[in-house]
Image (cartoon, helix red, strand yellow):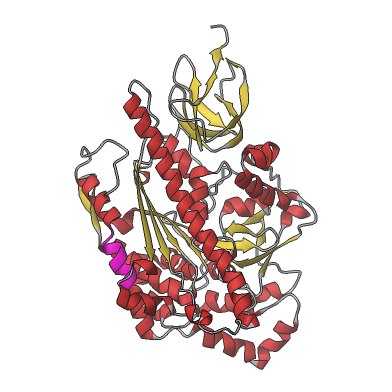
Amino acid sequence: MAIAGMSDCAPLNAKLAHVDPGHPGYRLRRIDETQPPDPRDRIFVVVTLSGGGTRAAAFGYGALEALRDLTVPVDGRAVSLLSELDVISSVSGGSFAAAYYAAFGPEKFFSDFPKDVLHRHIETALAFKVLAPWNWPLLWSPYFSRSDLAADYYERRIFGGKTFSELPERPLIVLNATDLTAGAPFPFLQDSFDALCSNLDPFPVGSAVASSSAFPVGFPPLTLRNWNATDDCGYEPSKAIVNAIKGGPEANAHDYERATERFSFTTPERRYLHLSDGGISDNLGVRAVLAGLVSGVPDLPILQRVNGGRIDKLVVITVDAKPGVAIKKDHGRRAPTFLTVLSRAASAPMANYSTDSVAWLQESIDTDAAFVLDAIAAGGVTLPHCFDYYGVHVQFENAPPEIKERLKHIGTRLELPKKDVALLIDEGRRQVGQSKELARLLRDLKDPETFPCPSPPDE
Amino acid sequence: MGFVYVHYDRERSVYVDDEWTGFTNKPLRVSNGLHDIDLGEPDNVTPESFSKIVKATHTILRPLELTFVRDGA
């Protein structure tokens, strides 16, 4: 399907004749009072997997291994915390792990993902494809690039041609790319595709991973057709989008930007959408989760489930494979090279933005908890539905000193030495397995009367 | 994110921007910004809806308070 995209007449994404917001599609569905609570929502577990090529995929693999091995009591049964996983939101390298897990299930993920992805020489394979003379006519076309070659490779050799229609409902995977024009996150969910008058169901998972990991310069953007610009599928921007725009940036600057970007798909000028690496707009995959809690235009209606009393415990595990900074560049007086400056100019804002996102999520939760505790202290006040939050940030900074530097110097590549892969897997597994927050979750599940909600974090 | 408290003489669903958000007479978490808030069907309350800006300063103790009255009550 990616090779078919070389022609302007054969876009990657299928047209949707008529948008139906009530159609399930691949999304986290909105709920209402008529639907009985889904017991799977009670403990709502989200994992976010950052960018960083194979480094991120391996780190995420180790983290998921630890979740598999962690047993928690749920409704009187001992279950793996992995079985409670509801959402995986990923970017770039992390999207390989998320997509593979959803496409093939946990058993094959843990047995075959290392062989199929982590130890595969993806970069070498892609280089051979670019250098192969029979691909040159394709690459000479302005409508076909290295990214399309990569998408085709991932579809055939890694994801077995799987499409979104074949993915299970849970965990829902959010593969995040970046709308290059708007500089905004573009999640591969039916809500985004509704705005394009497009159907996500037949879209190949491999192409979505290629979009999410189209690192600038190395991989040109992948292009989707915005059918909404030229055809009428009955798409109407939601009232939330209309109000976010009407309220303006003064009322909520973030929602104004999100809404404006989504609304822009209705303009005739935007006939195409160019998708680049998700890390440009969110290198942790955490913005979708954050928006799910604080935004009026979320793609993940998590807050709706909180208000509806459906979520008692919210667990967010952020797996952050951010590399270290090359301090040695400051050892000499000579200024860094042009390429180094370009690289840092691209990566530094990403890293700073990611740090802010994690901090914002934690601050939002802390503020909410403070309001609830104040209300409890005041007495005689009706409380909102309260929930316990468990935030885990898996990152190289938490590694033991002797291996931290080794981890931080592992490059952003699509192939790594086996010893580096093993190191990343071990550390991802160790940090999640020894997480104090998850230990607190386990204690709270074993004895739910221990603390009133919200339970105080461990000191 | 702020808190909205919708007063009504019985329990009914509350809709924010046409999405179900919870029930009346209980603090509801709502994102900052401009929102339309109503009680959905049946359309037998006054006013029909409110259009208000929710702020982070709307806490549980001092929420944005809205009151709907049943027609004919």
Q: In this view of the protein, can residue A387 be seen by the observer?
A: yes
- Please identify the quarter of the rendering in which residue A453 is found: top left
Q: In the figure, is residue B16 to the left or right of A222?
A: left
**Magenta region:** A426-435
Identify the residue at horizontal 25%, vertical 60% (top origin): A70
Is residue A421 positioned above or below A313 on the image? below
Q: Nearer the viewer, residue A163 or B34?
A: B34
User: Furthest residue to the front?
Assistant: A333
Q: In this view of the protein, can residue A309 be seen by the observer?
A: no
Q: Position of residue A144 (x, y in %)?
A: 70, 77
Identify the residue at horizontal 72%, vertical 51% (top origin): A264
Q: Nearer the viewer, residue A331 or A64?
A: A331
Residue A427 among magenta residues: yes
- Total labels drawn: 0
Q: Position of residue A182 (x, y in %)?
A: 68, 58
Q: Quadrant of the N terminus of chain A?
A: bottom right
User: Of helix, strand and loop, which mostly describes the magenta segment?
Assistant: helix
Q: Nearer the viewer, residue A362 or A125?
A: A362
- Please identify the quarter of the rendering in which residue A341 is found: bottom right
Is residue A334 positioned above or below A400 on the image? below
Q: In the figure, is residue A229 to the left or right of A405?
A: right
- Please identify the quarter of the rendering in which residue A60 is found: bottom left
Q: Position of residue A74 (x, y in %)?
A: 25, 47
Q: Position of residue A348 (x, y in %)?
A: 56, 68
Residue A378 among magenta residues: no
Identify the residue at horizontal 48%, vertical 82% (top origin): A328
